Amino acid sequence: MSPDASRALCGTPDEFERGCRRDMDRARAEADRLKAMSPPRAAPAALAAFDAAFGALSDAASRASLARNVHPDPRMRDAAERSEQEIDALSTELSLDRGLYDALAALDVSAEDGATRYYLQKSLRDFRRAGVDRDEATRTRVRALREELVRIGQEFGRNIKDDVRRIELEPTDLDGLPEDWRRAHAPGPSGKVVVTTDNTDYVPFMTYARSERAREALWRLYRLRGHPKNLDVLARMLSRRAELARLLGYESWAAYVTEDKMIGSDRAAAEFVEKIARAAEPRMRRDFGQLLARKREDVPGAERVEPWDSAWLQERVKAEQYGFDSQSVRPYLDYARVKEGVLDVTGRLFGIEYRRVPDAQVWHAEVEAYDVVEGEKPLGRVYLDMHPRDGKYKHYAQFTLASGQAGRQLPEGVLVCNFPRPQGGAPALMEHGDVKTFFHEFGHLLHHVLGGHTRWAGQSGVATEWDFVEAPSQMLEEWVWDPGVLAGFARHVETGATLPAEAVRRMKAADEYGKGLMVRQQMFYAATSLELHRRDPEGLDTTALVAELQERYTPFRHVDGTYFHESFGHLDGYSAIYYTYMWSLVIAKDLFGPFREKGLMDPGPARRYRRAILEAGGSKPAAELVKDFLGRPHAFDAYEQWLNA
């Protein structure tokens, strides 16, 4: 069971496609084997065939998604995109196979363990939600719509990923930016400086650049990514999703996609968005009042704060009123040390070790591989693909390379990020927000590996309800605010001094500022994803709807000629359920309670948490996982205390 799934990304495009088709052939064979079993079928053997069929498809789909998003060779990305379409088509075909469904439905699992009974119950529900019990004409149309939606989603994401825009600015427009950032953006032959819409450029520029004119120019450019192509792509996406939902008996895509989540319905999701928005409103008004007051120091009589002012003004308020300048901690946060810190903290916390695999086959020279072990027991392998490049996914995420299964296959996962790259021997300095993102995404990786040893591949790793998926990662963010944890890796690149505890205290106090603005911004995103999928797409002006929602949930005006929704990549994968980030955060704040009480590095709650939440994968409903750890259902109190702190 040695990990080697990355080999598939290191061959030729033809070899990659052949490998995916071999998995598809295996899936067909296992499905046929299940249907050919003479009734009454033995539940363990029948479920093993079913699990193997969909497990093979899942692994092939994971490899294809990863290759499409990170491979440096455009031919390989194209091959992966074609493979993804073929795999999804077969997955849809099997999910609509009435013979397969009937074989499963006839199984008697009353003598099996709880995880197996839950697996069968959930699988039968998913078959019905796919439309297996509809007439042949409906199933044919469902199949066509699902295949088309895969292509549409790929097109939507590709138009964002490939649309890196550039602006030329005067060197003086960089005033206020960190010195290392300025060194990496030297003027070209024209005397101008090129700044891109990649996050490694955009976020620091919007936070630190003193020139309002330059910030506005880059802000507007950032909100043109994907435009105008994705306006039509999004319209087609919404239309096909709505048609599919109606075919399956649902009022809207939002109603369909929320039904199998913890929240249960689109109505409950809308009520949750409003509940959080109301709870955050007093805090938002106070935060915004401070922004406006600070702007009036520079622009007497200013009536509003422009959206391109927000990050810069928040930074000024934090520095002047809370005594914390974000740039002051950057010299303590060298990427190489932060990476070692993440590995050290999570290793000690969960009793595991990461061993570098220097000879692992990887798809790019910058990718690092580590085996995850407990003593001498191998648990899986993780890959770190951490710096931006052309053609690569532009955000931050954990991708599955291979799902694990007890006794059969070790899990393999990939962290895909876009952090600053060390250049010419100079350290790559990170923002504290980058460190938080690193811990967050690594939380997904841990969930994938530690939860990748379940009996059934279909319950492996991050296989819980989608609105619980973010909770373990959001909880791990708490560690980046602890002075003791930071002291282990946050050291000045020149002096070697550790980040002072007093600086961490000021940083934490400053972070409390802007919380209301952040939560309401998140509710704008959540409402956008939900409402785009609750409305009738026929004749829907998506730009007007997004403008209306922005001005309802945030204090910032919509700017004509900008199109945020065309580069809102979550509209593909998350569709209507962006609310899940805040729903998960409510749970994460509650999960953190035992760690707060005992100490962040105390092995007691960490080991209990590992067993109850991470190792369980998707073998129980998420609400039961939480209850297993906390000893009670999750509550809203901890989140409310955090919001009002």
Image (cartoon, grey):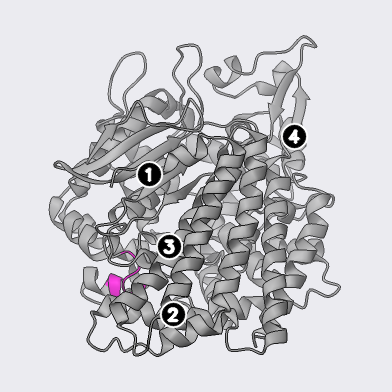
- Left or right: 164 as drawn, with respect to 332: right
Q: Which residue is mark 3?
A: 55
Q: Amino acid at mark 4?
A: Arg
Q: Which of label 3 and label 1 is nearer to you?
A: 3
Magenta-colored span: 617-626
Q: Secondary structure at mark 2?
A: helix
For label 1, the SS is helix
Instruction: Report how far apart the C-alphas of labels 1 and 4 lie in the structure.
Output: 29 Å
Residue plotted at (40% across, 65% down)? 52
Indicate whether residue 398 is drawn in magenta: no
Horizontal arrangement in the rendering, residue 560 relative to residue 461 (left or right): right
The quadrant in which the C terminus is found is: bottom left
* Front: mark 2 or 4: 2
Front-lying residue, 315 or 122: 122
Q: Dot 1 corresponds to which residue? A: 439
Vertically, is 103 above or below 278? below
Q: Where in the figure is residue 141, as x and y percent of width and height? A: 73, 78
Confirm or deny contact between disc 1 and disc 4 (CB under 8 A): no
Give me the residue at 69% from left, 54% from top.
Answer: 556
* SS assignment at label 4: loop
Cα separation, mark 3 vs mark 1, equals 28 Å
- Tell which circle, 3 or 2, labels the residue nearer the N-terminal end: 2
Q: Position of residue 118 (x, y in %)?
A: 34, 80
Determine crowd level at label 3: few under 14, some 14-19, many 20+ residues with C-alpha closer than 10 A. Answer: many
Name the N-terminal-most of marks 4 and 3.
Answer: 3
Distance Cα–Cα, label 3 vs label 2 = 19 Å
Residue type, label 3? Gly
- Where residue 36 is drawn, which disc sits there? 2
Q: Position of residue 378 (x, y in %)?
A: 22, 45
Marker disc for residue 165: 4
Q: CA distance from mark 2 to mark 4?
A: 55 Å
